Amino acid sequence: KRPSEYLAEILSEGELPKIVAAVSQYTISQSVVGDCSFVCSLAVCAGYEQRFHARLITRAIFPQDERGEPVYNPSGKYAVKMLLNGGMNASKERRGWGWA
């Protein structure tokens, strides 16, 4: 099936697609990204989230529902909150999100 057919099937049943089903350090791999420390950090966060059920990666994906879970966006646009040297990057794209 094409992705659009799969999505139409889910939406016809009254459900929204689940954005993040599971986080695992074993599914992260380095390909085009040249910064191996960044990829390693993602793997460590994924492992921590899976082991301790603490939301490190999934809480950084937007838009979110009232429980803070990433939700389906019909426009297909998503944002990821990232810190640079321990602080928020003040890029124009992220200013309107109201992140604290």
Image (tube, rainbow, N blue to C red):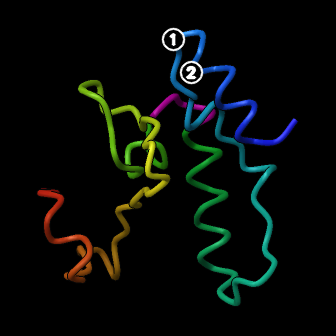
Q: In front: 15, or 85?
A: 15
Locate residue 7: give its quadrant: top right
User: What span is in magenta?
Assistant: 50-54
Q: Residue at x 44, y 38 (%)?
A: 55
Is the residue 29 above or below the residue 1 in the image?
below
Is the residue 62 above or below the residue 34 in the image?
above
Is the residue 2 above or below the residue 88 in the image?
above
How many residues crowd mark 1 within 10 Å: few (<14), some (14–19), many (20+)? few
Q: Residue furthest top?
A: 13
Name the residue carrying label 1: 14
Q: Which mark is residue 11?
A: 2
Q: Of helix, strand and loop, which one carries label 1?
A: loop
Locate residue 78: give its quadrant: bottom left
Mark 2 and mark 1 in contact (Cβ < 8 Å)? yes
Left or right: residue 7 versus residue 75 is right
The secondary structure making up most of the magenta span is helix
Q: Quadrant of the N terminus?
A: top right
Q: Position of residue 71 (x, y in %)?
A: 42, 35
Locate residue 99: give its quadrant: bottom left
Identify which amino acid the numbered label 1 is placed on: Gly
Q: Quadrant of the C terminus?
A: bottom left
Q: Residue furthest bottom?
A: 34
Q: Of helix, strand and loop, which one carries label 2?
A: helix
Find the distance from the CA under tag 1 to the CA under tag 2. 5 Å
Q: Position of residue 38 (x, y in %)?
A: 59, 76
Identify which amino acid the numbered label 2 is placed on: Leu
In the rendered image, residue 87 lying in the magenta stretch gets the answer no
Q: Position of residue 90 (x, y in %)?
A: 19, 82
Q: Which mark is residue 35?
A: none
Left or right: residue 2 versus residue 11 is right
Q: Residue at x 66, y 71 (%)?
A: 39
Q: Residue at x 64, y 40 (%)?
A: 23
